[in-house]
Image (tube, rainbow, N blue to C red):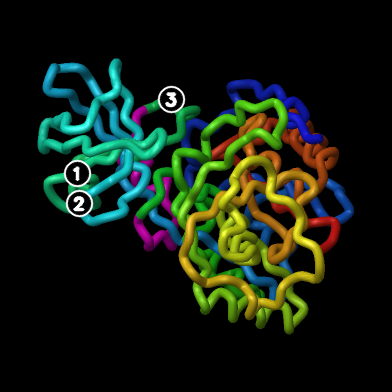
């Protein structure tokens, strides 16, 4: 049985990247190949290690200015992080306050407008906004940087904590593997015969949620909205027919792709890692294209049904994302890769360096 302590490591704080590199793509790339060998590269080398007919699958979610500060009618300070927008003027949000606000309470946000608390859904508060949530966030909100980045979001973060292809607003955290790609890299990949496709998975604050259960079987996975469009399914079919690989750009793209291979209702019980699916890989035309919430929890023992490889950043100790990459490459190869990255002073987490991980089965 898998335990949390198996996915721990010690990271010197100075290796946590606090700012992005000077330009997109000016980062290092640690390549863990299918034979579990390590190669120190730069991100520009990615074009050389991919093959014609490979398919890169990007997450086109767009980070919203989801963080607001304000106060209650009593004067107490509140901090609001919008997690979801189920209706135009209604949001589900995390609310930090000295005392949790109750139904009917009014919160004054950004000294600009009032929202009303109408109820709760688990840890999230239901908030009614006086106008379109996205419009108010764009005018008054702040980019919700991860908790390990210590400065307040500024203009540079608004530009750089967003992929160049972001188009579907709804994320409260960036799909950070995509931050390395610029227009020049996209053009070089196309010239090399590497195809591209898109999924949408709105990254939630749960991506930073620690695993609190020592036994992974007891962890309840957070939910995120995802969609794999018909065009992407067709691109997967073309890549397979041409002998190319399906390569997820980021763990969020990976979760969206793999979720599409599981039947409706597969994540109704979100406790513990998702068990492997027996039988052959599903044909591309069998993948689900209906938008839905996913609580897919990929951990060692999982059998990958869609993706063959992954481009990703380095992940937090004891996180479900570290478990995901360990499932793809193997626990020991990932331990060795992370130890090597620390020894070689790679930059970690959202603004840090990248990995290209090839599955031993690819």
Name the residue tied to disc 1.
128
Q: Is residue 267 above or below residue 103?
A: below
Q: Nearer the viewer, mark 3 or mark 2?
A: 2
The residue lying at 12 percent from left, 46 percent from top is 130
- Expressed as whole percent of the image width and height from the top left, the position of residue 278 reads 80, 63
* Quadrant occupied by the N terminus: top right
99 in magenta: no
Q: Which residues are magenta?
A: 152-169
Name the residue tied to disc 3.
150
Q: 279 left or right of 355?
A: right
* Quadrant occupied by the C terminus: bottom right
Q: 15 left or right of 69?
A: right
Q: 336 left or right of 211?
A: right
3D distance between C-alphas at marks 3 and 2: 31 Å
- Expressed as whole percent of the image width and height from the top left, the position of residue 303 reads 77, 57
Q: Is residue 10 above or below residue 350?
A: above
The residue lying at 17 percent from left, 29 percent from top is 105
Q: Which one is earlier in the sequence, the residue at label 2 or at label 1?
A: 2
Marks 2 & 1, CB-CB < 8 Å contact? yes
- Expressed as whole percent of the image width and height from the top left, the position of residue 318 reads 66, 30
Name the residue tied to disc 2.
89
3D distance between C-alphas at marks 2 and 1: 6 Å
**Residue 6 in view:** yes
Element type where label 1 sits in the image: strand
Element type where label 3 sits in the image: loop
């Amino acid at each position: 049985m898998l335990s949390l302590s198996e996915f721990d490591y010690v990271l010197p704080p100075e290796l946590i990247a606090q700012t992005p590199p000077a330009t997109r793509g000016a980062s290092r790339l640690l390549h863990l190949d299918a034979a579990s060998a390590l190669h120190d590269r730069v991100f520009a080398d990615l074009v050389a290690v991919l093959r014609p007919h490979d398919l890169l699958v990007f997450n086109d979610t767009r980070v919203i200015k989801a963080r607001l500060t304000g106060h209650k009618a009593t004067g107490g300070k509140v901090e609001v992080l919008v997690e979801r927008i189920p209706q135009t003027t209604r949001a589900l949000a995390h609310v930090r306050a000295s005392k949790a606000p109750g139904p009917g309470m009014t919160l004054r946000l950004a000294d600009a407008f009032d929202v009303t608390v109408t109820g709760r859904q688990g840890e999230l508060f239901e908030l009614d906004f006086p106008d379109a949530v996205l419009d108010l966030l764009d005018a008054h909100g702040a980019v919700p940087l991860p908790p390990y980045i210590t400065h307040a979001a500024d203009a540079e973060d608004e530009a750089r904590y967003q992929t160049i292809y972001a188009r579907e607003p709804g994320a409260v955290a960036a799909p950070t593997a995509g931050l390395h790609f610029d227009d020049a890299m996209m053009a070089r990949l196309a010239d090399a015969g590497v195809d591209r496709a898109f999924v949408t998975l709105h990254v939630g604050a749960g991506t930073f949620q620690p695993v609190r259960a020592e036994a992974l079987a007891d962890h309840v996975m957070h939910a995120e909205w995802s969609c794999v469009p018909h065009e992407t399914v067709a691109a997967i079919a073309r890549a397979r027919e041409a002998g190319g690989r399906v390569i997820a750009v980021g763990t969020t793209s990976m979760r969206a792709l793999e979720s599409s291979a599981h039947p409706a209702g597969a994540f109704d019980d979100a406790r513990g890692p998702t068990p492997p699916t027996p039988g052959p890989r599903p044909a591309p035309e069998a993948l689900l294209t209906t938008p839905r919430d996913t609580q897919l929890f990929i951990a060692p023992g999982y059998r990958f049904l869609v993706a063959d490889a992954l481009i990703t950043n380095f992940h937090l100790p004891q996180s479900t994302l570290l478990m995901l990459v360990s499932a793809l490459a193997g626990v020991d190869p990932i331990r060795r890769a992370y130890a090597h990255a620390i020894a070689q002073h790679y930059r970690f987490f959202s603004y840090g360096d990248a990995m290209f991980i090839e599955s031993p089965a690819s």
